Image: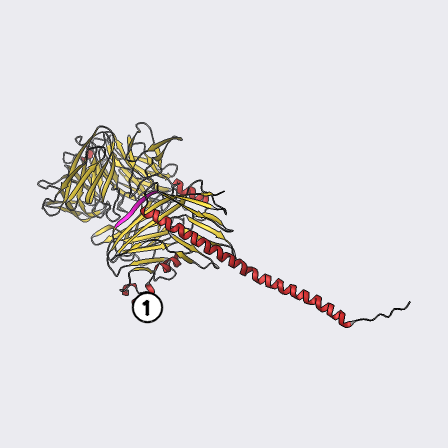
Amino acid sequence: MKYDLVRDEEAVSAAVATVLLFGGVLSIIGMMMISMIPVIEELQGSVERHDMSSQMTLLAKQTAELSETGMPGDSTEVELIPLDGDIVWDKTRGGMWYSATWFEENTLRVRGALNFDDTIEVRHPESEVKSICIDDLRLGPLNPYIYSIPSWVDEALFSAAPGLAIPLGPIDIDIYQNGIKQELSLALDQSHTLDLRNSGEMTLKSSHQLSLIFSKGDGGATIVSANDASPVDKTGRSWSIPLPAGQSQIHVISDIANQVRISGNIETTTSYALPSGSSRVAVASTHTIDLQTPEVIHVSTSTNSRLLLRTNVDGGIGATSWPSNNGALLGHEFNTPGLSGELAITNPSTDSITITWKGGGTSVAGQSTSFVSWPPASIDGSPIIDASSDIFVSWYASNSTLMQQNVSSITLLPAHDTGASSGNSHLYHQAESSIQHTLAVSLQGTQTNYNATMTANQSALLTLESSVATIITTEGTSKIIADENPIRVHHLSGDDGLIQAMHDGEQRCVAVHIQASGWITTSLPWKSFSGRSEVDLVAGWKNGLHPASMAISVLGVEGANSYSTIGTAWAFHLSRLTYQFSSSITGMEVAYSGGAVVTNHPEFNAFIVSSPSDRGGPGPRFAATIPSLHPAANSISGGGTMTLDIELEHRQSLASTTAYEVRRGWSSPYGEAIAIESADGLESSEDWTIYPGRIDLLTDYVGWVPDPSYGTSESIWHTNGDAIQFTLQMSSLTVDIREEI
């Protein structure tokens, strides 16, 4: 059989072409898919970013309203519905800070306060920086206030320290002694007394700040800090004082005429203190209170004042270190108590100085103490004393000249290197006395060596495990020097005394004594947590090993005063509520922190969705409330539908006074973007257009101006050189996040 086979070349070519065409089409489709997938992912990322931005903006508005106008116990509920991303808390990258100066032509900048290490940097080129005092603000619901009670305390009286808005419910207090924990609930306006005779050392951990007074024996005298103490000179207009049963005396001192109102579970009284008409005499008034049971007494005044408390009026016991008119314990001018007693005037310098007052004066040799019967004869009120150099002043409830060293009392021994309650160098002079005198040394940091020389010959190492020491003194002069972290020294004389206590993270002061045009680096008397995990950091905040936000007071030379509070900075560790998602790349987020809504989408470009809330004008005025948003212990994270219950715990005033320069800064990565975004309307300024970066020539604009320094995340509230009516508040908010099923 014969077949006639014919090869159709055209058909073969057509088949091959079809296959190749199909392969080419598939290749083109594949290439198109490869190129389109990032576009599709970016589009999805854009949808997620805009969707969550709108939800976070609603969260910011409701949080701002609750922070500014809410009362403790008020709450709001916000629902967040993520698409494919997760909602998590970021506790290490949500920091911000404010700074303010209290004198004209002074500037203050702070750097590195939120770096979790043990150093900070300040910049104040106008004068010498003498010292820096740092307060741990204990910001966050999981960070209790810690109070260490030494063994020499016989009785501890405490109540809740009020603020602008304080909790309505009970305050939780844990009492630790010898490893045993006791729990206590303290209601508002309720006081509690701990009998500590023969009890040894004890620790209190409170969910709220306390007004705490240590008493020894039959009590004594102490100056009491105001609830609303001014950051400039530490005066105030309101006090809440837990008083024991019996008779107590309150002595109020002010510069001008004063109205004093005393209330509580007693009959409310209002009295008036008027000037005597004499020059160099302040206004003083004395009030006696009789209580059948321990009570909380509220005192309010019409002008800034200081308050001296005595719990033993007729016993001739008690003494207290007295602050200068600039607020530091070391100064040139003092409004002294008008109560009968004596003044101990200590000269920490090596040169003799002259002390004057209306109608008299005295001199004090170098590194010695002189005692003066007080007040001088024929002076009615609060005599003002002036010194030719810096001095310390203490008031003694003594009735006989040169018998002050026989007065039983508890006094704070100020540090002459910092001019404050703690430091690295203390000077103590003891005259002839018939009673025992003891110096109680406590560590204000993590570790230090101290050396007591001359009449008190002793040295030791203080650590977290062994943080207190006792020095028995004799007649003469003693110097106590610490070589690392600062110390606080209490002078105990006899068997009686009274003093207001501080929490463990309060007024840790370090000496600087440097004037420089650039940045000054100084130590932070806490443990460094640089490079540690978030778990370790949170534990450090809770235990007080590292400050959970801080207030930084810079003391320097202003006029004739060497230790004026030049300015104050507040640095806040704020938890960021973050929505994490991915687009064409990973690592995208939309976050809420400190009142601002921010995002790094697209491609890690810092973008401000919503600026933080503040209030400016009319005129040179500025007010801000920091919404301190922190998760509750049982808050969850994840990608489901989340309901946020936000509750206002308390609102606290940080400053309400006249400032001359106000700055605000943010931690990376959004600090610079927030600084630029906040300067809304600056582009319309002709002065800024003609002279960019010249704040001194900017006259047609009031508001935020980015700091002209390169790459800074700070901005300056510009008011054309006018003084600023500055108000700063902090609202503590607890967030409980639950997933909706």
Q: Give the total of numbered labels.
A: 1
Q: Which contiguous range is marked in magenta? A: 649-656
Q: Position of residue 652 (x, y in %)?
A: 31, 45
- The residue under the point 27% across, 57% down is 126
Q: Nearer the viewer, residue 453 or 621?
A: 621
Q: Position of residue 524 (x, y in %)?
A: 36, 47
| Residue 553 visible to an observer of this rendering | no
In this rendering, position of residue 121 left or right of residue 326: right
Q: Is residue 570 left or right of residue 22?
A: left
The three-letter code of the residue at mark 1 reads Thr
Work out which quarter of the rendered image holds the N terminus and state it. bottom right
At label 1, counting other C-alpha atoms closer than 10 Å, the crowd grade (few under 14, some 14-19, many 20 or more) is: few
Q: Is residue 633 magenta?
A: no
- Picture quadrant of residue 315: top left
Question: Can you identify the residue that label 1 sits on?
Answer: 689
Q: Is residue 651 magenta?
A: yes
